[in-house]
Image (cartoon, rainbow, N blue to C red):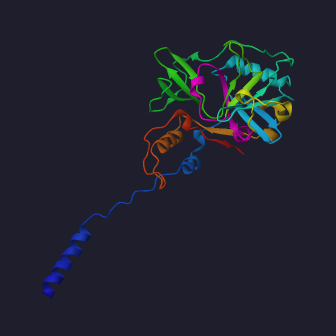
Amino acid sequence: MRKLASLFLMLGLIVSASLPKAVVAAPEPSLDHIIQTAPASDWRTLDPDDLLFMRLGPGVVVIELAPAFAPNHVANIKRLARAGFYNGLFIVRAQDNYVVQWGDADAKRPTGGGRMRLKAEFDHVYRASEAFTPLPDPDTYAPSVGFTGDFPAARDPSRGLAWLTHCYGMVGAGRDVDADSGGGPELYAVTGQAPRQLDRNVTLVGRVIQGIDILSGMPRGHGDLGFYQSPAERTPILSIRVGSDVPASLRGAFQVLKTDSPSFQRIIDNRRFRKDDWYKTAAGRIDICNIAPPVRSAQ
């Protein structure tokens, strides 16, 4: 009996030794790991002439402008900024889970060569050469969504139209009932759940790349639509300047991960199929407003 048991034991060792060893899957890279290991070629340095620096008491808010989508509004906003139009104005509205708004709420300040009103730039006819990185999942509001440059955008291929989407941190030009009643003297940033019903109803001009926490932390207004009821509640704007007018030593440099890069594709896959220990069920899809191109300091 002992000899038989020894024989079985020996045969078991021989069989186990001949079996291939189990392959242990490498852990999925984290979002931070993807960003930190992205090669230099996957990053783009932002043009300071397409940046706005808004200095408030609590800190500096940096906005990247989108001239490809709203060229006339962007040019007008730069003209207003260079004329000192915004300096000394105020944050006038902070509506909970919606927007923070600033600028000339009374429409009384001279524009210094800028314009109070412009023809709306809600969408535009896109060119075949215009870059677009589509997301693979369906969208409720548009036939196709993705990124043009580092801006969240939507497209209607049947009509050849493209437009920016109202995601968190996007910046738009406030207007009245008339579609052409905005132009840049009043601006707002989305600080709540994406109000996508505003897409193609307001001209979007850019997105906040630094300081959205400052804007979203503004005291809520208790007047209609979140407007402050007294001037004392408003936060003063110390200055708004075009980035290229700010000394390089003060503005620094910003880089954004290219949305047509392999690294950003890895981020899309990572966000669609989250496999870390906390997630038990991966959604398998991503919303355009639940993913944003990372921005970093180049210094």
Q: Percent position (x, y) of residue 275?
A: 45, 51
In the rendered view, would you say 83 is above or below 261?
Answer: above
Q: Percent position (x, y) of residue 247?
A: 83, 36
Residue 111 is drawn in which quadrant? top right
* Residue 193 is a magenta residue: yes
* Residue 59 is a magenta residue: no
In the rendered view, would you say 51 is above or below 32?
Answer: above
Tell which of 272 and 235 is nearer to you. 235
First to last magenta residue range: 191-218
Q: How many marks?
A: 0
Q: Percent position (x, y) of residue 289?
A: 56, 34
Quadrant of the snapshot with the N terminus: bottom left
Tell which of 286 and 247 is nearer to you. 286
Please name the residue shown 85% across and 22% down the image.
83
Please name the residue shown 58% across and 36% down the image.
258
Please name the residue shown 18% across and 83% down the image.
6
Q: Is residue 88 left or right of residue 128?
A: right
Q: Percent position (x, y) of residue 226?
A: 72, 30
Residue 221 is drawn in which quadrant? top right
Please name the residue shown 40% across and 57% down the image.
25
Tell which of 91 and 147 is nearer to you. 91
In the rendered view, would you say 280 is above or below 260?
Answer: below
